Amino acid sequence: MHSLIEGASRAADLESSESVMDNLMGLLRVHVKRGVNLAVRDVRSSDPYVVRLKTRIVKKDVNPEWNDDLTLSITDPDIPVSLTVYDHDTFSKDDKMGDSEFEVRSFIEALKTYTNLEEIPSGTVISRLKPGTDNCLVDESAIYVNDEGKIIQDLFLRLRNVECGEVEIQLQWIHYPGSKTF
């Protein structure tokens, strides 16, 4: 399971962080843009937030605009990244509003293949992933070079285990010195 790297405050946390760092391929920025047509879990609406790492709560909105950036450590490109949407409740346990997952292998392969980005025009689509029964994609997902010369992937994910709802996210790799991937 992919997780956020945080500063370690205890010896056990430090040891765990060091083992993650030993196997770390890199960091993935997940920009959680918005939810669309999310399930109602309160009287007329919901107070949704996304958990993998946690976005902020958007009060009384089944079409929330989060625009939150979450950073995940990637140690194995074959492990899918999962996320869950919850409805925040003040006086009771938060209600689950669905879950989804996405794979990062295609995105990482594009990063490895296209290293000379200054020669690739902005807007160039490097790869496309099709929705299917083996993924949670609602629409085709493009991996492309953006205006800043970075490789980006846009994904529109269908929530599972719920009557309705979708989450829009965008992936961007965070390069750091000594990354094992590149």
Image: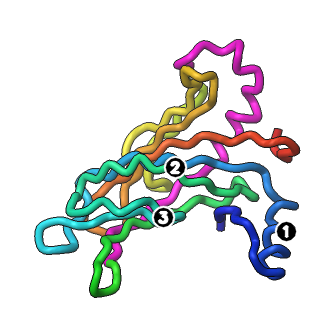
Vertically, is 2 above or below 118? below
Q: For residue 110, what is the image quadrant?
A: top right
Vertically, is 176 above or below 4? above
**Residue beneath the point at 36% across and 70% down:** 86
Task: Give the labeled residue for mark 2.
Answer: 69
The span picked out in magenta is 95-124
Q: Which of the pair 128/28 is nearer the observer? A: 28
Q: Position of residue 93 (x, y in %)?
A: 34, 85
Mark 2: which secondary structure?
Answer: strand
Check whether the beta carbons of the residues at disc 1 and disc 3 lie within 8 A of each other: no
User: In the image, is residue 8 part of the stretch drawn in magenta?
Assistant: no
If you read the primary sequence from the N terminus, does the residue marked by circle 2 or circle 1 appear first? Answer: 1
Numbered marks: total:
3
Task: Give the labeled residue for mark 3.
Answer: 54
Classify residue 25 as left or right of residue 90: right
Mark 3: which secondary structure?
Answer: loop
Q: Quadrant of the C terminus?
A: top right
